[in-house]
């Protein structure tokens, strides 16, 4: 099972200039029941929408808001929380990765993956690499069947 990071979810956002490859889109559709995301990803996207509202890019914010609702429906029942078990993993990850400048959102996503024995699906291997979780970059690595 895979925990889909924010940058992978966002690759399909209506405000992106480049569309994901058809191979990647087909793989995501085939893997759908094995793909999860996290409440942290929802928060990161919502932060982006709030920023757009603040700078009065209302039309763009509205497009992203509509898209985010569709993402939430697509992942219904598969949006994992940052719970006590994940928090325990986060404490250990924060200590082991203390020499790396990794933000808490990435640590939280990694800890949710660890708590659920999942692989993080991300293009951000630089930040997730030192966190001690399995990582797959769908844009660079071989996609499993």
Image (cartoon, grey):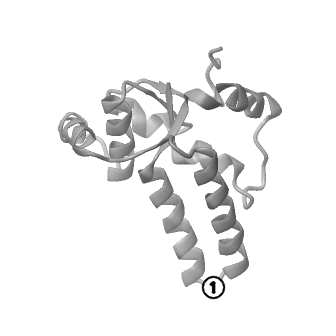
Q: Position of residue 51 (x, y in %)?
A: 53, 75
Q: In this view, does 80 lie to the left or right of 8?
A: left
Task: Give the residue number, with chain letter if any, for mark 1.
Answer: 56
Residue furthest front as drawn: 77
- One can see residue 51 in this view: yes
Q: Position of residue 74 (x, y in %)?
A: 64, 46
Residue sitting at x 58%, y 44%: 75
Q: Where is residue 19 in the image (x, y as percent from the top left)?
A: 79, 46
Residue sitting at x 23%, y 35%: 89
Q: On the image, which quarter does residue 43 sit in?
A: bottom left
- One can see residue 98 in this view: no
Q: In this view, does 6 lie to the left or right of 145?
A: left
Q: Position of residue 24 (x, y in %)?
A: 73, 31
Q: On the image, which quarter does residue 87 sit in?
A: top left
Image quadrant where one finds the C terminus? top right
Determine crowd level at label 1: few under 14, some 14-19, many 20+ residues with C-alpha closer than 10 A. few
Give the total of numbered labels.
1
Q: Is residue 38 left or right of residue 136?
A: left
């Amino acid at each position: 099972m895979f925990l889909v990071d924010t940058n992978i979810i966002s690759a399909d956002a209506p405000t992106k200039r480049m569309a994901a490859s058809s191979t990647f889109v087909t793989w995501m559709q085939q893997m759908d029941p094995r793909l999860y995301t996290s409440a942290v990803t929802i928060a990161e996207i919502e932060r982006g929408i709030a920023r757009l509202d603040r700078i009065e890019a209302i039309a763009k914010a509205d497009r992203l808001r509509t898209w985010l609702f569709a993402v939430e429906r697509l992942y219904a029942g598969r949006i994992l929380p940052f719970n006590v078990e994940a928090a325990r993993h986060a404490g250990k990850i924060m200590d082991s990765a203390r020499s790396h400048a990794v933000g808490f959102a990435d640590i939280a996503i990694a800890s949710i993956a660890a708590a659920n024995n999942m692989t993080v699906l991300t293009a951000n291997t630089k930040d997730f690499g030192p966190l001690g979780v399995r990582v797959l970059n769908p844009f660079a690595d071989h996609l499993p069947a």
